[in-house]
Image (cartoon, rainbow, N blue to C red):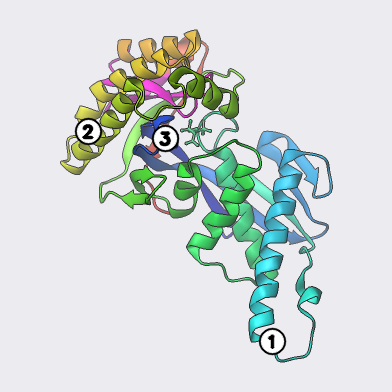
Amino acid sequence: MSARGAWGAGKIILLGEHAVIYGHPALAGALDLGVRVDARPGRLRLRVPAWQLDVDADDDHPAAAAVRLIADEIAARAAEAVAITMDDGLSAESHLERPAVELVADATVPAAAGLGSSAALAVAVTRALAAASGARLAADEVAEIANAAERAFHQRPSGVDVALASAGGLGVFRTATGLTRLPVPPLALAVGLSGEARSTATMVARVRDAVGGDARDPRLVALAACAEAGAAALGAGDVAALGPLFDVAHRHLGALGVSTPSLDRLVELARGAGALGAKLTGAGGGGAVIALAPGREADVVAAWRAAGATGMVVTVGASP
Ligand code: PMV
């Protein structure tokens, strides 16, 4: 696939998942893994071979519904722009067509693992369809449309995934203020995949029950404090300080009920292989763990693989 397609990055939440939904800060970065989408002439459909996904835009499937929503949103904006500037006597409705393109995605980020795969796809599809329609979208419009697609499938997403999928980099995200980039070099991490099926919506609901919907719950406040301390440490160039913060955050996430025995085991294996700290990342209930092991990432991945899990070394904070 060409390197010219439309890109959306995966993401890693370093600290602050779940708490971020309640207005607290999360420290997160874009992955060097993501989704690249090429638009080719054809009938509107989406193929993601790496995820065994192949849908026609009219299919009764969540991914097809996302493509429809994005295509219609772009068409509506294009029509609005035409209606404002139009002096050729055409009706704005004549521009309200979905583009006839086949979207083919090269996905390097694993699906449904807490690594922002759906936001990466939504951003890449938005960019590809905008380009195919000749629509010029500002960065915040790309994020708005991709977030609308995300909202249709996840209850109450904080927006952190889409912010990083579209803007890249590493920073502190808050629902109230969006992403504030930290000018720090990209960070190497080991990522382990539990392979367990998971649902973000179920985990978000579990935390809501656990905290009774209260943003002041001490576990959420503690997770937010970890995110703030992590941002301060990174800002000061003290990457190693993230390790103990990962450990503390994993304990609080466990107390909220979103860890699993497999995730706990991956975390233990990472620590045994020399990691300075490890935790689950994303919604939990399965998915991925991250481990900070400067210079020893490969040892951690080897320990996971020896135990039958999948692992890889990634870079967090890459810019598009
Ligand atoms: O597991 P993911 O990639 O869906 O990430 C979820 C992160 C949460 O904080 C749990 C939800 C959110 O919308 O921020």
Residue topped by disc 1: 86
**Residue 77 image-quadrant placement:** bottom right
Secondary-structure class at tag 1:
loop
Instruction: Note whether 65 is above or below 113 in the view shown.
Output: below
Residue 280 appears at what percent x and percent y?
42, 22
Task: Work out whether residue 174 or residue 29 is closer to the camera in this orientation and state it.
Answer: 174
Numbered circles on residues, count: 3
- Spatial distance from mark 2 to mark 3, Cα to Cα? 18 Å
Work out whether residue 177 can be spotted.
Answer: yes
Report the amino acid beneath label 3.
Tyr
- Spatial distance from mark 1 to mark 2, Cα to Cα? 52 Å
First in sequence, mark 3 or 1: give its number: 3
- Span of residues in magenta: 273-301
Residue topped by disc 2: 229
Mark 3 Cα within 10 Å, few/some/many (few <14, many 20+)?
some
The disc placed on residue 114 is none
Instruction: Note whether 235 is above or below 143 in the view shown.
Output: above
Residue topped by disc 3: 22
